[in-house]
Amino acid sequence: MAVEAVAARLGRAADVVAEIIRLSEVSKVYGSGDATVNAVDDVTLSVREGDFLAVMGPSGSGKSTLMHILGCLDVPTSGEYRFAGEDVSRMNERELASIRNRRIGFVFQQFHLLSSMSAWRNVELPLLYRSARDRRQMAMNALTQVGLATRVQHRPNQLSGGQQQRVAIARALVTDPTMILADEPTGNLDSKASREVLDILRGLNASGHTIILITHDPNVAGVAERVVEMADGRLAERIAA
């Protein structure tokens, strides 16, 4: 076989391995007849290992529905979704739950921390669904990554909003996920805390983590390497100037 042909084969194999997400003509439809809503409309998207992608759009654009599909919280009505090579678009709830727990780290606008638990206990929670050893140490390591090594025993009401979001990021990190999905992570924060959280996400991406950021704010989206914009359920990639 010619050297060029071997190189081409190896290149194609590397592309397959490096691709984390592939959406092919994915749609999500609610209702029927005159009440039909195409929340996501014929979306095709590829995300590679190590990408930092922002999905930007106003309320009602379809970005939240797309986030639910990307996070395996919902399945498309039509089209195909492959996550790390696996077809998840037709998985049942048990299989989707396994993907969410083991391969996706979630960061939400509302933090979703348990008020009765310390920071490290909150971070430990995803590990309870698997037989992980050294859960406390893994939680401590994740909190250290986000700059909260001295706050591990603090409960959420003893932390600022920015610190609570950093606990949530540590919780997303603790399972060593394939992808981190951040939904409006700065939506409840002041400008200083927002910058700190975005700096952490940039640092995680620089260390090799694949990150998808959902936002309505173009300034927040600007920290990502790629930006796609949603409107009326459709997706268009912003071309850098």
Image: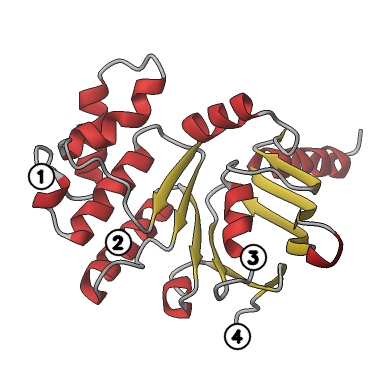
The residue sitting at 60% across, 71% down in the picture is 60
Task: Point out residue 199 in the picture as x, y percentages from the top left corner.
Answer: 31, 63
Q: What residue would you read off at disc 2?
A: 197
Q: CA distance from mark 2 to mark 3?
A: 24 Å
Question: Which of the two labelled residues, at mark 4 and mark 2, occupies the earlier sequence position?
Answer: 2
Q: Are marks 4 and 2 in contact (CB under 8 Å)?
A: no
| 10 Å crowding of disc 2: few (<14), some (14-19), many (20+) | many
Q: Are marks 2 and 3 in contact (CB under 8 Å)?
A: no
Q: Residue drawn 78% across and 43% down?
A: 12
Query: Which residue is identified by label 3?
Result: 62
What residue is shown with label 1? 151
The three-letter amino acid code for the residue at tag 2 is: Val
Q: Which residue: 13% across, 43% down?
A: 155
The three-letter code of the residue at mark 4 reads Ala
| Residue 126 figure quarter | top left
Amino acid type indicated by mark 3: Gly
Foreground tag (3 vs 1): 3
Circle 4 packing at 10 Å, graded few (<14), some (14-19), many (20+), is: few
